[in-house]
Amino acid sequence: MERKQSIVILGAGFGGLRTAIAIAKKIKKLHLQKKYDVILLDKNSYHTYTPTLYEAATTSKTTANYPELQEIVAIPIGNLIRKYKINFIRAAITTLDLIGGDIHYDNGRLKYDYLILAIGSEVNYFDIPGLKENSLSLKTFIDALAIRNRILNYISDGKKDLKIVIGGGGSTGVELAGEIQGWLRELRTETKNSCDVKTTIIEAAPNILPGFEEKIIESASIRLKKIGVNTSFNEVIDSIKPNKILLKSGREIHYDIFIWTGGVKASSLMQTLPLKREEKRKQIVTVPGMECLPATPDLKLYGKIYALGDAICFYDPITEKTIPKVARAALVQADVVANNIIEDIKAREEITSKTKHRIYQPITYPYVIPIGGKYAIAKLGSIIISGFWGWIFKILVELNYLLSITNPWQAVKLWSKGLRIFIKNDRLG
């Protein structure tokens, strides 16, 4: 009897989950479940729902306790894939043998025929001395709780002065700074502590949100100033010491809590693979169909290997710039990967004689930047919406993300739970 073919997806982020579910649906529709296994592998038992991490980091314990936050931010993978025939393995990968076709993980080994690399990214500390040791990050649910607890401890201990510094004025830093401001106002009322809090963003570029449109930057700058967030531009961090930031300009900034949101990089595992990379960043590149290429033409890779999301560097053929590492791009790439694998399977099974492969075509995706309370800046094509209606758009975007990675009933259930909590959390207008 011919062995079952294995379609293995590494990583249960947005791209990985979307790919696994799309392939599982199509395998079922083609009645090929006895011939093909869809396997999802991740080191965690949960999917980190990143759009709400900044809110989890600034939610009072009176608004939501640990289990309530965990349920909507660290969503069990089993719940998301329950209705689909997907085998989930919780394990950390130790080695990927792309020549022999083997995946080595904790206490096991797995053979793949189709491999999808959706491992995601990790925090990039840019080799800045002391940065990792003296900062908090915002990449996981545990990170969000660490930020929340650190701030709570300072306020609850009756401290009269608190300096919070955020390194990085990209969207994550801006969102977090705005939300912190609203939460601190509430905390001072709850604890009856008139703590003088100063929140500052340090950015190496001449403005916040580098790479965004001028109108977006202007609106976000006005909003941050209105709610009391300080900004410091054209400042590059030289090193970090406990409670002190040393800048290349010679300035020193003192802090009580330092949060680093200044960048991410591809997973360390991806950096060891014998795949073609672009010269500048040394990140893996793919062809437009999202398939990976060997590092050298003479190298023979096992099976078919695809990559998507934060795991790759993809150039827009029109602008020749790298596309942003955003969830929407990963979801579209996932659909391309799923389609192309299924088309290959249909040809292999002689279901069709003509395959219809797709290519990934980057577009300017709509986006939303919440900045404290019921306020957000949203961009849809050429239209910019700010304020309360931007915040409404943010809520709808979050529902859409959940619909992309699970069935409608589960998506609405999770979304409504999160909405009940975070609508209380969005305090400032």
Image: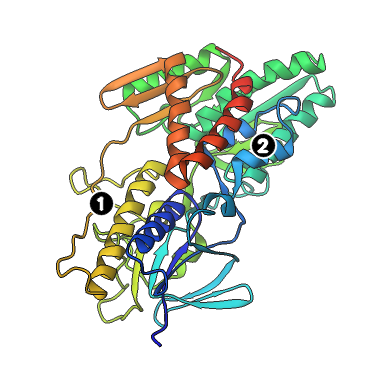
Amino acid at circle 1: Tyr
Given residues 207 and 25, the one toward you in this image is: 25
> Which mark's residue is nearer the viewer, 1 or 2?
2
Image x and y of residue 364, in percent? 28, 36
Quarter of the rendering containing residue 329: top left
For the residue labelled by badge 2, is the local secondary structure a helix, a strand or a loop? helix
The quadrant of the image that shows the C terminus is top right
Given residues 250 and 405, the one toward you in this image is: 405
Amino acid at circle 2: Leu
- Relative placement, left or right, of 299 versus 403 is left
The residue singled out by tag 2 in the image is: 69
Please report the residue visible at 25 percent of the width from the left and 75 percent of the height from the top.
348
Please report the residue visible at 22 percent of the width from the left and 55 percent of the height from the top.
359
- Relative placement, left or right, of 409 versus 219 is right
- Relative placement, left or right, of 287 versus 281 is left
The quadrant of the image that shows the N terminus is bottom left
User: Local crowd at mark 2 within 10 Å, few (<14), some, or many (≥20)?
Assistant: many
